[in-house]
Image (cartoon, rainbow, N blue to C red):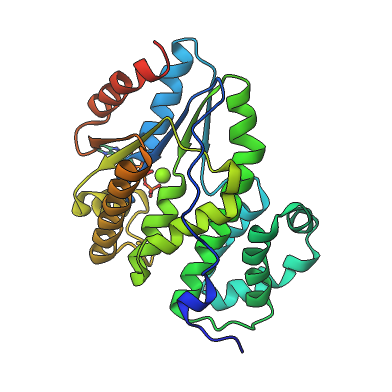
Amino acid sequence: MADGNYTNIYKCGKINSDMQKNPYPGKFIVFEGIEGSGKTTQAKLLAEQLSKNGKKALLTREPTDDLFFGKLARLMYEAESAQEFVRESLKGLLLNEEYLNSKRAANEKKLMYITRLEEMAAKKISLEHQNIILLLQTIMTLDRHEHLSQIIIPALREGTVVVSDRYFLSTVAYGAADGAGWRPFLEMQYDVLGDEFLMPDCSIFLSVPVVIGLERTMKKQRGRLEYHDTRERLERIDRAYQEAAEDLRSKHGMVMENFDGSGNIQSVSGEIWNKIKPIISL
Ligand SMILES: Nc1ncnc2c1ncn2[C@@H]1O[C@H](COP(=O)(O)OP(=O)(O)OP(=O)(O)O)[C@@H](O)[C@H]1O
Ligand SMILES: [Mg+2]
């Protein structure tokens, strides 16, 4: 049995490279924020506004709906438990054609993370909490790589404005909220995404008090709260978002705009539109 120590498991990352600035004609806009902050609502409104103004827009989200690792991530959070997920879904991994194609195309670093999934599937790694969090974020990051290479980059190449509901900062913030700090999750992005780790032209962070995020989520889910939607956890996620964003802003020149997401839907949308217009040359 491999040991469950967090740093012994994921230490292949080194932040010695940089995110790639978008070299394509299309623009890449992403939405981030805690649950209930309004990402899905505002991403949709922005994509509609872009289309109305004659811009070709693609609204997309993470985890993805149709790519292999995106579907796997959704199965993971819909499962009764991580144990059930590993037993029922992860076990079939080695036989899945889409998975095998990804594995064949993977470079050395990505392969290390893929191998980790296989070790989980073979129950060589314990299902303790930290490892479950890493498993989920690894699957999300593998999905992100396919999202970039199969959906985002081809659209940007064609001059489309890509609007993504969540991107890498979600992994960094949600991973960190479980106590391991955000840096290893950022390292995972450099490792797995490699040269395709594209910096958004603008990250829109919707900021809402945790109680508002929880209240909206409660309404949307008609009372059922996901296991992670406690006030304390959302506060940790929010803090990790801020810390990681500050670091990325100062050291990597990441463009991130904060918006108060607690205003009414139309006024938040208007403020976002004003900020985005010059970025997309309108
Ligand atoms: N500014 C707003 N004022 C009031 N309600 C809002 C506002 N923005 C969104 N909502 C409502 O709050 C709920 C959550 O919004 P939304 O689904 O857009 O959030 P989200 O950030 O995408 O959440 P999740 O992370 O869970 O996907 C929805 O029912 C939505 O209609
Ligand atoms: Mg949403």
Quick one: quadrant of the C terminus? top left
Pick out the residue farthest to the bottom: 1
Pick out the residue farthest to the front: 16
Give the number of marks.
0
Q: Which of 81 and 233 is in front in this view?
A: 233
Residue 138 sits in quarter: bottom right
Q: In this orientation, does residue 180 appear?
A: yes
Residue at image location 37% in from the left, 53% down from the top: 221
Left/right of residue 187 with respect to residue 92 in the rendered view:
left
Residue at image location 28% in from the left, 59% down from the top: 234
Residue 4 in the image: state x and y as whole percent: 51, 83
Residue at image location 32% in from the left, 21% down from the top: 273
Residue 85 sits in quarter: bottom right
Residue 148 in the image: state x and y as whole percent: 59, 40
Left/right of residue 56 with respect to residue 264 in the rendered view:
right
Left/right of residue 82 with respect to residue 240 in the rendered view:
right
Q: In this orientation, does residue 36 appear?
A: no
Residue at image location 48% in from the left, 36% down from the top: 164
Quick one: quadrant of the N terminus? bottom right
Q: Quadrant of ligand 1?
A: top left
Residue 99 in the image: state x and y as whole percent: 74, 58
Residue 86 in the image: state x and y as whole percent: 62, 74
